[in-house]
Image (tube, rainbow, N blue to C red):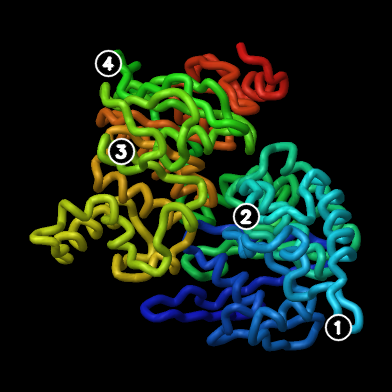
Amino acid sequence: MAGIVKRFPGVTALDGVDLDVLPGEVHCLLGQNGAGKSTLIKTLAGVHTPDEGTITWDGTEVTLGHPQAAMDMGIATMYQELDLVEGLTVAENVFLGHEKSRFGFSQRSAARAATRELLAGLGHPEISPTAEVGDLSAAGQQIVSMARALSRKARLIVMDEPSAVLDSGEVERLFDVIRQLTAQGVAVVYISHRLEEIRVIGDRVTVLKDGRTVATGLPAKETPTSEVIRLMTGRSIEYVFPERGTTPQDEPLLVVEGISRRGEFEDVSFSVRPGEVLGLAGLVGAGRSEIVETVFGARRADAGTVTVGGRRLRPGSVDSAVSAGVGLAPEERKSQALVLGDSVAHNISMATLTRFSLGGLIDRGAESEAAQELATSLELRPTGITREIRTLSGGNQQKVVLARWLLRGCRVLLLDEPTRGVDIGARSEIYALVRRLADDGVAVVVVSSEIEEVLGLSDRVLVVGDGQVLHEAPATELDEHQVLDIIMRGDAA
């Protein structure tokens, strides 16, 4: 790809980007949220047509006018926000668009057998080809998306944040699969905000900033992380967490007692004081997301109680939680937190509309003013609160979700994977924001698959495994190895 330019109304997303990929290599594409990575790979996948520049495949200049053209050429793309069809089975998703058939008739048994083989190769034989994909966990759906890309016998596979919802063991299996592919000459474009992964799996690195290529062809294993960060951000960033405040001594604000949901988690109890950050550490599928969603009322507990400031919340009632001052930033932003076709301003204000209403009508001027103030303070990129939120990068969409609860002024904030798909610069901003909220007296609960993040951000940590609390301790008394040991042993301490 040479000199790629892509313009949208009001913004130039790509401004002369260059990228070359060799057979059998893992080429890592890095950049902050909003740098142009998603637009670039959608151009490579035939979703967008470049306004300027050329794409050359096997020495021949080509035009990728639609996604099928890219797939026919041997280019498969795994998007960060999965494009699976929830109403179809796993096998139907894997072979969607290139169904196995003979003499015009679908060969469903052959598709199921091929899917079973692909899933076994990915280390997940337990996923049934006949299961409905919408019933799978986020990690399970990611595995299906990988199988879908592999089913096309692609020569180039683009992987956008493939490890974001995987635990450490699943990431290792992913890397094994990538190594098998590259050994066969398949090229991989790998996008990740976890810079430590780049050194493990990458061969070369290209860095984008503000829609331009600022470096390309860097050796992944030799280039210092500090240099990569400088190229991405234009400055040096120390990957540190904000300094913890004094240990809160007030009475608990959030009290969770013995909540359970059959098949998900059992007899979970904890409390959080005003100004305290409680972290939930554990592997994907341990029940962490289900716990915070139940506290928020998005799931109904079979047993137990949730109390905020002495007020008992109605089980399974989001209205009860929100009116008591509880906010949730869920793991799946696009499907659970955002109205993608609506504006940034409306997405920020939707939990606070009564503040801007008069006689049943919304004061759009006051709403926009409040939204703009938050967008500016959180350094939302690109600027402009009237644009559709679907046009923002994942990290900036996450900032909008946080802005919603900042505007609401919640007393308890539940953050599920708050930095998933967020670049290192925006991570530092989110960490500082979480600590600022705690210093202002908000009780914060943080769920993260990255143990380092839980330990660095939290005052106190619950280690969760198989739907139960295995261990509780101050964050300063734990390290990553101890947490993993507790998780692997699976015994409540």
Give the amino acid type for the residue marked by disc 2 in the picture: Gly
Q: Of tags 2 and 4, which is closer to the observer?
A: 2
Labelled disc at residue 320: 3
Residue nearest the viewer, comparing 211 with 414: 414
| Marks 2,4: beta carbons within 8 A | no
The alpha-carbon separation of the residues under discs 4 and 1 comes to 70 Å
Q: Of tags 4 and 1, which is closer to the observer?
A: 1
Instruction: Please state, as top left, top right, bottom left or bottom right, where the C terminus lies in the image.
Output: top right
The alpha-carbon separation of the residues under discs 2 and 3 comes to 28 Å
Q: Secondary structure at mark 4?
A: loop
Question: Which residue is under mark 2?
Answer: 134
Question: Which residue is under mark 4?
Answer: 250
Which residue shows up at 36% across the image and 42% down it?
Answer: 318
**Which tag, 3 or 4, sits closer to the chain's start?**
4
Question: Which residue is under mark 1?
Answer: 104
Q: Secondary structure at mark 3?
A: helix
**Which tag, 1 or 3, sits closer to the chain's start?**
1
User: Measured from the top left, where is residue 308 in percent x and y?
Assistant: 30, 27
